[in-house]
Image (cartoon, rainbow, N blue to C red):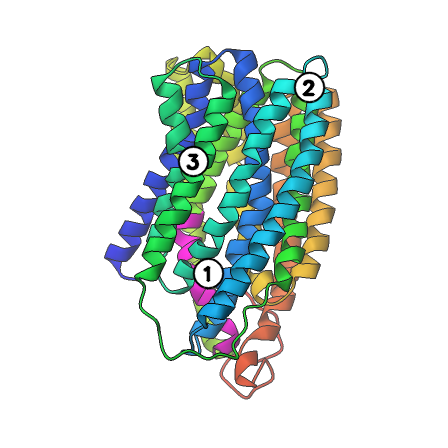
Amino acid sequence: MSKRGRAGQTLAAGVSLAPGFVFPFVLAIQLSTESSDLFLLASSLIVTLASVVGSAIEVNTVVQMGRVLSRQREISHAERRRYRKRQLFFAVWVSVGLGAVLTLVYGVRVYANDPGLFILVACVCMLVPIFGSSASVRSGELIARGNSIAPVLLQSFRTVPPLCIVLLFPGVHPVGVATALCFGEVCRVLLLEMILRRMPTVSETFEHERLVHAGTGIQALSSASTQAGPVTDRFLLGPITGSITAYEIADKIFYACFQFVNMSMVVTKLRVWSGIRSMDPYKARILIRRDMRNLSLTCAVVVGSGVGVLWGASTAGIVPDSWAEGVKWACIGLSAFPFAIGTFVCSRFLVIAGGQALMMWLSIIVTVSNIAVNWLLISMMGPIGVPLGTALVRVAAFVIYLFVCLKVVPRVFATDLGIGEKANLPGSTSAPLVL
């Protein structure tokens, strides 16, 4: 990608993240603490289900399309329609099933006296990841075809409508805000489809080429296990007034930084990384080492600037009281930011290497550890134990994922060429990858 392309990608990432980033801050000011807690807890279903469903579908689409397009072949329209229908069906049953369980758990735990409003808002929010699955397939296709700016930029359509509703109509009913979220997701699907239809094809169509969707389910299970930690955190913090708002503010700050790096760097590289099966092992190592160095430098800049801005704002006294606790939690979370990015990148390489099942077990181990550590620290230290425990577990998770990734990924270099690791090529040894 050219310098202009990288600048455009970074700008698109910043623009797309802005609405979602400011959303919980606006809610904390425009709504009462109780109303803000209710809506943010209900809308957290979107974050959980999008991580489980949307992310799995998008990554699987990029990898499957990337492998076919890297061989200068094109997918038939019939195969694309079949793939989209199966992914939509997958999204419906996962969103409804998992969403219903989380709604009941949260409703009974936090709003046992009057769960009706919470359940209604949560049910509307469950429609967002279902619409989002169609957006994820189209987004993955665009990324595989080399257009990563449009999918990144259109992420903002998810939260622009509800943000406008809250700003224009303070005190609006939570159901109206949830409906606006659905409207924004539908707009995103339509725009992505319009852009995709304008993309040129790479070559003639090969009718026998198939997009495998089986790995989506395993990857979704892996993502679901990682989301068990945040779900447990919200479950533990729910009865403590103001803790959900603080948690969501800290989470949005961390998520904004995370997605900025993801959208500006990782998304653009995923299409290239998916071709390591058709790449000379020596060149593959050089590529990965260079990208990891650039990614590490970017993470260091993001953490330094993020913590500096938050600490400076808190010290200067310009942070409203309703944001103060969340900002403090965000500083703790950002301390482990590079390790979270490292774990995320390792998981993407495991998907490319076909190690979804292995990744699922790693996710379960990390999640169980996260739940145990957070429960122990919140019992000892109160709500502040949640961000502290999460930061500690992110460091340990990176060490585990990196160790496994260095052992597994080099084995798939050049496998699509029928060469593999044992070929007599420069750097083609059976030694693990060293970054």
Front: mark 2 or 3: 3
Circles 2 and 3 in contact, beta carbons < 8 Å: no
Is 391 displayed left or right of 158 in the figure? Answer: right
Q: Name the residue under label 1.
A: 270
Image quarter (top left, top right, bottom left or bottom right) of the N terminus: bottom left
Front: mark 1 or 2: 2
> Percent position (x, y) of residue 314?
42, 18
> Going from the N terminus, do you reach mark 1 or mark 2 first?
2
Q: Which amino acid does label 3 sit on?
A: Phe
- Residue count near mark 1 (Cα–Cα under 10 Å), binned few <14, some 14–19, many ≥20: many
Q: Name the residue under label 3.
A: 183
Circles 1 and 3 in contact, beta carbons < 8 Å: no
Q: Which mark is residue 113?
A: none
83 vs 7: above or below: below
> Percent position (x, y) of residue 30?
42, 14
Q: What residue type is labelled 2?
A: Val
Would you say residue 158 is visible in this rendering? no
Residue nearer the viewer, 88 or 359 = 88
Q: What element carries label 2?
A: helix
Front: mark 1 or 3: 3
Residue 269 on the magenta segment? yes
Main SS, magenta residues: helix
Q: Residue 110 carries which label?
A: 2
Q: Which amino acid does label 1 sit on?
A: Leu
